[in-house]
Amino acid sequence: MYRHMKTITIHVSEPVYREFKNLAQQQDRSTAELIRESMDLYLEKKAPPRKSLLDLKPVSLGKPKRKIFSSDSDLLDEMLSDLRS
């Protein structure tokens, strides 16, 4: 079930609403429940799939313009020396 629901107003033709209402009664469900389910199915079938950050490929930003640390230094040593100062 949904955690938070948004109330919306939609305009549909009488025949479409009547059909949803009849289907809901036959299935012992609410009309709103069928409409929510229809919206979910539409999104499953028609909406473009959501992308994950894991789907993104790494981007090269080029080479560094200058060295940040000397070749014999270690990042941890740099950080610790900054803390001691």
Image: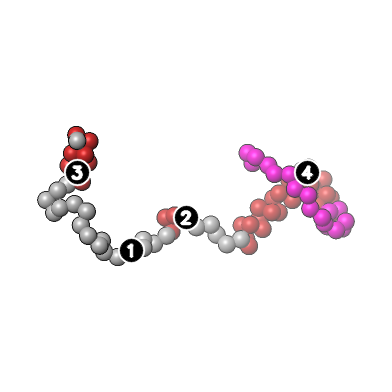
Report the amino acid beneath label 1: Leu
In front: label 4 or label 3: 3
Local secondary structure at mark 3: helix
Of circles 3 and 1, the one toward us is 3
Q: Which residue is drawn at 44% across and 54% down?
A: 53
Structural distance between the alpha carbons of marks 2 and 3: 35 Å
Marks 4 and 2, the one that precedes in the sequence: 4
Of residue 47 and residue 78, the one placed in the foreground of this image is 78
Q: Which region shows up in magenta?
A: 1-18
**Of pointers 2 and 1, the one earlier in the residue sequence:** 2
Identified at 17% across, 47% down, the residue is 74
The disc at residue 78 is 3
Q: Hey, what amino acid is under mark 3?
A: Glu
Query: Residue extending furthest right?
Result: 14
Q: Earlier in the sequence, mark 1 or mark 4?
A: 4
Residue indicated by mark 1: 61
Q: Mark 2 points at which residue?
A: 52
Q: Which of marks 1 and 4 is in front?
A: 1
The residue closer to the viewer here, 15 or 10, is 10
Q: Is residue 43 magenta?
A: no
Residue 61, picture quadrant: bottom left
Query: Does the magenta stretch mainly form a helix, a strand or a loop?
Result: loop
Badge 3 or badge 1: first in the primary sequence: 1
How many angstroms separate mark 4 from mark 3 (CA)? 65 Å
Residue 34 in sight here:
no
**Nearer-the-camera pick, 67 or 24:** 67
Tell me if label 4 and label 3 are in contact, CB under 8 Å. no
Q: Name the residue under label 4.
A: 30
Residue at the farthest top position: 84
Q: Which mark is residue 21?
A: none
